[in-house]
Image: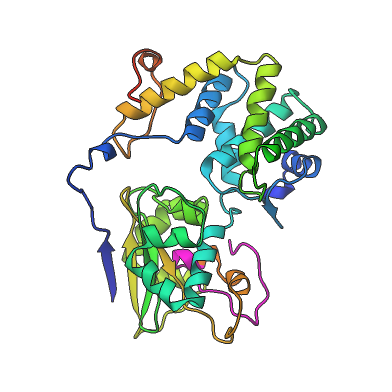
Amino acid sequence: MTAIDDPATRRAVEGVPGIPRDAEGPVFREPWEGQAFAMALTLHDRGLFSWAEWAQLLAEEIRRAQAAGDPDTGETYYQHWWNTLERVITEKGVTSTDTLLRYRDAWERAASRTPHGKPIELQPGDFEGPLDC
Amino acid sequence: MATHSHGDHHHDAGGDEEEFSQLSEIALRVRALESILTEKGYVDPLALDQIVQAYETKVGPHNGARIVAHAWADPAFRERLLQNANTAIGEVVDINTLDSDLRVVENTDRIHNMIVCTLCSCYPWEVLGLPPTWYKAAPYRSRAVLDPRGILAEFGVQVPEDKEVRVWDSNAEQRFIVLPQRPAGTDGWSVEQLEALVTRDSLIGTGLARRPDVAPEGAAR
């Protein structure tokens, strides 16, 4: 079975224009792009948004980036995808920008105390303390 | 006879910044949102992993293919690439930072190279995309060193007895890609045409570049 046979993925690829893909399904340049795709797929399946709604918000995001000078060569597609995801979940009240920032900083603390090559894991203590940079 | 070459471990003086981990801005934001969605019960991290894994074999090695095509087309670039891949690749692909030192190992008439990570699954994903599932699986990781010719035969690559097989073991500091041999019958081809002949497996060393008379077959596995 190829990945595109998965009905949820096929609906996403058909409903959202521009998803970078080959004959068999979406392609990703970096691991986080795959995670961003998977998160949107999961939230869609939970009914948080329709693909039509998503496509419209994503198009707005891309237009905004183009106006700001983004070359739109496809290499920044998932950057726009990510901005759309953060916007959707804050607008729908799933979480707030403040909470996102608090968790982002916690992950930075977690990374900076984790020796290179070891898995980085979030601990309660990571939500407090100064950041190096 | 197979040679098992471990990558050099470079511990430069003053390289203290390498001691602890660092995540890119986008990686921090992705992890932040995943933590929040998991805590709120919106997503199951295992389910997310499964979706990502479904695509691991589909990820195109776009950057790696471009690097190889340029090396085939431009001997001076090929030299720079083999001397110092970390700086040379910036000439042809848009990669700002590498996780680790990258070295390009060249296939010749006398040597066939393949890469593995026996310890875990270190992989030059910046140039090859996400690793295929088999690359991370124990059978490949253990047998690549013990029986590289056997593995290659299973991938459909017959290496003549008089050709040496070199296996390069990746680690957190040093990663490799294979520069496959340019297929015959491609004289005068453009970089774009050549790029289409470079498969992911040929960059890992478990395959050869496509022959020009063979139509693209899609993902090999």
Residue B4 or residue B70, whichever sits in front: B70
- Residue A9 x, y percent position in the rendering: 72, 41
- Residue B188 x, y percent position in the rendering: 59, 84
At a point 66% along the width and 51% down the height, the residue shown is A73
- Residue B177 x, y percent position in the rendering: 42, 63
At a point 51% along the width and 50% down the height, the residue shown is B130
At a point 43% along the width and 25% down the height, the residue shown is A107
Q: State which quadrant residue A59 falls in.
A: top right
Query: Where A105 falls versus B203 (above or below)?
Result: above
Q: Is B210 inside the magenta-drawn segment? A: yes
Task: Give the prevailing secondary structure in the magenta stretch.
Answer: loop
Query: Where A14 falls versus B90 (above or below)?
Result: above
Q: State which quadrant residue B215 falls in.
A: bottom right
* Span colored in magenta: B202-221
Query: Where B218 falls versus B42 (above or below)?
Result: below
- Residue A82 x, y percent position in the rendering: 62, 33
Which image quarter holds the N terminus of chain B?
Answer: bottom left
Tell me if residue B39 can be seen.
Answer: no
Which image quarter holds the C terminus of chain B?
Answer: bottom right
State the residue lying farthest toward the left: B13
